[in-house]
Image: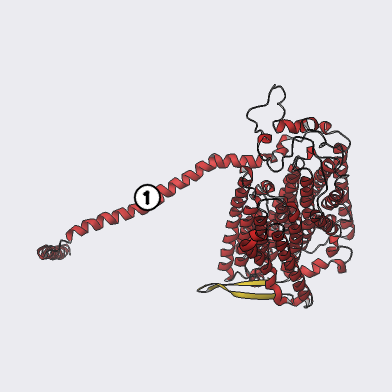
Amino acid sequence: MLELTWLIPALPLAGFVVLLVAGRRLGEPLAGWLATAAVGGSFVATAVVFLGLVAEPAAERRFGQVLFEWVPAGGFSVDLGFLVDPLSVAMCLFVTFCATLIHLYAIGYMHGDPNFTKFFVYLNLFVFSMLMLVLGDNMLVTFLGWEGVGACSYFLISFWHTSDANASAGKKAFVTNRVGDWGYMVAMFLTFTALGSIRYVDIADGAAGLTATTATAVALLLLVGAAGKSAQIPLFVWLPDAMAGPTPVSALIHAATMVTSGVYLFTRMNGVVAAAHPWVSTVIAVIGVATALVAASIAVAQNDIKKVLAYSTISQLGYMFLAIGSGAYVAAIFHMITHAFFKALLFLGAGSVIHGMADEQDMRRMGALRKLMPVTAVTYIVGWLAIAGVPPFSGFWSKDEILLFAWEKSPVLWFVGLVTALLTAFYMSRQVFLTFFGEARWDEPLEDAVPELAVERGLLPYEGENEIDDDIEQVYELDHLPHGVGPKEAIHPHESPWLMTLPLVVLAVMAAVSEIIQLPVTNTTKYLEHWLYPVVEQGEHHLTASTATKWGLAVVAIVAGAVGILGAASIYLKRRLDEQPAAPEVLRNGWYYDSGLAAFMGGPGRAAFEAVAWFDRTIIDGAVNGVATVVRVASGGLQRTQTGFVRAYAGIVTAGAVLVVFVLILRGVVL
């Protein structure tokens, strides 16, 4: 059964190739069904491999499969091979499961799009790249998948590239991830220098023998790479803009696949982190909890339904990094799995709302949609309760476990994580109340329903002016409205087709019950911990907190979530839209981090880059060109002595002989 591992990435790759060659001929919807079948087949293959691994004794659950020798170069040799162990199989299971549902959903969501087939070409290639990332038995194969998901994210985020904003969002994601890729590559080089291998088996066996300085350097470089892919401070700026892509892309990239790469990488390299200086884990935890808090505070003030979820993703990834920094690798993977289910559900639910609201994404235009979109509403509420940490839904258990480890690491980290949990419950409740409850704000023209939004879109003048500002882009005068901008007329919401609602129902069930893989009731119910222990034993921290402490912290977390939900209800359920307090401008603008970064890059940053370019062009190239000029002039002068006349050569020989005699005489006189 383990020999079938090669099928897991091969099926999405085959789907990509077939669609690339014959996709246009297949057309809609056959191209979508083929892509879905390819990823679904990958999930079945993963399940078979999983059963084969379960059949092995716990100490022997590691299987390698080499396809061919990839890079032979002297003493350096890299195979294109797969490592099947509890971590890689767990990753493949939820990646292929969620990806299959997202592909199915996309058949309905992308209906009528002129580039329907191309979209599924990119999706299949993306899934193949992600599977190569998690299955690779060495850092170079992982890097192949690492770069593959980066390239596919560019294609998918800027899929509707006719809009400048969408094209820029794709480029932003691509460039930001390249910064992180630098850290990964240098970490790979340093690992090979220190251990003579980049195979994960060799790294795990040799990590304990690394010097603390070397391990620290590798861990910090991996942090740079992980921060890029998993959107941590300071490289999180690409993910909110990535919402420009179609909603299935948001669900695939930002829930179950690409953004989890950094967490997977650290879990795979946990032995290196354990061998590093103790302050390295503290740095990882601080970056994680700071990212979680900052992103949660920004999410509170967003009005775009997908932007809220984008910042929520950043925040939840911050929790996972907090877990890694606290030595809670099992908790990090546990939260990664539960997050994959409830965040994919929330993104797809948001897409269902956007679909039913004629492409409108601003929550101020929504309200009271639960009656017209009952399946979407009920499933979305399940996702909301899970991410808000309401027991017994899955998010409560995984988040509570991370907070428990954070408490043992530092009460300060725990407190910041708790405040973040409260904010999470608040902004997710705000989103649900504005979208599915309260008053309907879609059943009349935009100018009457939400005057504030009409002003922002240039349909009404600013206060104190008599006419519309000419500088405001009149989006409604375009032939095709930008995606996310609904019509100015009244909207007639409707429930989505079964192709879109079926994945919502399945994901809602998983978001509600997936905690069964790691219930902290007894030691025997911690299935994920027992499953992953052979992989994470080097870096996993063992809890020492008493049962009373665990229950006390759990109760505090529940109370914090309840405060967040009740606070949102008091504001967004009991008050009309025009009576609700305005969010601080600094939060609406993301603490001005993105704009500040853009201003720096366009000002001092550009000047610095131009200075570096001048130095390279003038000094470095000038030195090289100067040496070449000296050699050219000198050789030209010597060339003139080569006349071809014997008498000239005889004269040179005579002059040389005289010079030698003169030197000898002079030397004799001196001596």
* Image coordinates for residue 320, horizontal then vertical, percent: 74, 56
* Image coordinates for residue 441, horizontal then vertical, percent: 82, 36
Q: Residue at x 56, y 42 (%)?
A: 601
* Image coordinates for residue 605, horizontal then vertical, percent: 54, 43
Q: Residues within 10 Å of mark 1 (few under 14, many from 20)?
A: few
From where the camera sits, is residue 22 visible?
Answer: yes
Q: Residue at x 26, y 54 (%)?
A: 633
Classify the position of the N terminus by image quarter: bottom right
From where the camera sits, is residue 277 visible?
Answer: no
Q: Which residue is mark 1?
A: 622
Residue 555 lies, with reference to residue 563, above or below; the image says below
Along the viewing direction, whichever of 541 and 243 lies nearer the viewer: 243
Quarter of the image where one finds residue 162: top right
Along the viewing direction, whichever of 497 and 26 lies nearer the viewer: 26
- Secondary structure beneath dot 1 equals helix
Residue type at tag 1:
Gly
Classify the position of the C terminus by image quarter: bottom left
Is 433 positioned to the left or the right of 536 in the image? right
Q: Residue at x 11, y 66 (%)?
A: 646
* Image coordinates for residue 86, horizontal then vertical, percent: 75, 70
Along the viewing direction, whichever of 228 and 117 lies nearer the viewer: 117
Along the viewing direction, whichever of 574 and 604 lies nearer the viewer: 574
